Amino acid sequence: MTLETLKQCRKAAVDVRKAANRLAEHRASAGNIGGMRYGDTPHGCGEPLAPQEAYMEKLEQLQENWFQCDEVLVPLAREVMRSTSRLPYPQNRLIEDYYIMGDDWSTINELHGLNRQQSRYQVRKALEKILERA
């Protein structure tokens, strides 16, 4: 595994998180769509969509975007997990939380009860071990 793989995994994780947030925001804006009917009839050019159908089409687009982002993340995450499997506790969790989960350092440090200096040291040691195996 290379440093470039870690960067690609981090970018994919952030993209997945953003896509999931957009999807959640869109679902929250739905209001009451319980009586919605979604027909199979295609609309002609210029014909307006019902609000419910517009909501469903946007939802489908957001879901497709999320699936595409997730497909990019999964193989990269597997490679990172395989590389961190032999690392001791704080090192493997710090690498996984940052590069696979896409969390920021303040959240990770709070979660693991570390300060920024301790996490920098642990990440540096972890990266040395990971990159020397490659």
Image (cartoon, rainbow, N blue to C red):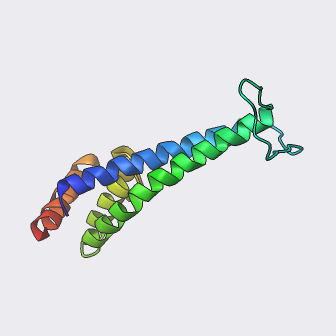
- Of residues 33 and 86, which is closer to you in this image? 33
The x, y position of residue 76, in whole percent, is 33, 61
In the displayed structure, does residue 130 sit left or right of residue 64?
left
**Residue at the spot 80% in from the left edge and 43% down from the top edge:** 41
- Residue 12 image position (x, y, % from top left): 38, 50
Residue at 57% from the left image edge and 40% from the top image edge = 22
Classify residue 40 as left or right of residue 61: right
Q: Is residue 107 visible?
A: no
How many numbered discs? 0
If the image is split into quadrants, where does the N terminus sit? Answer: bottom left
Residue 57 versus residue 115 in the image, above or below: above
- Above/below status of 1 relative to 103: below
Q: Position of residue 28 (x, y in %)?
A: 70, 40
Q: Residue furthest front?
A: 44
Query: Which sits in the foreground, 66 or 105?
Result: 66
Choose top left, top right, bottom left or bottom right for residue 122. Answer: bottom left
Which residue sits at x=29%, y=74%?
A: 85
- Left or right? Give the position of 47 relative to 76: right
Farthest residue, direction top: 46
Residue sticking out furthest to the right: 35
The quadrant in which the C terminus is found is bottom left
- Residue 105 in the image: above or below residue 113: above
Residue 6 seen in the current view:
yes
Q: Name the residue: 26% across, 55% down.
A: 6
Q: How far across and how far down the image is residue 71, in percent?
A: 44, 58
Most extreme residue toward the bottom is: 86
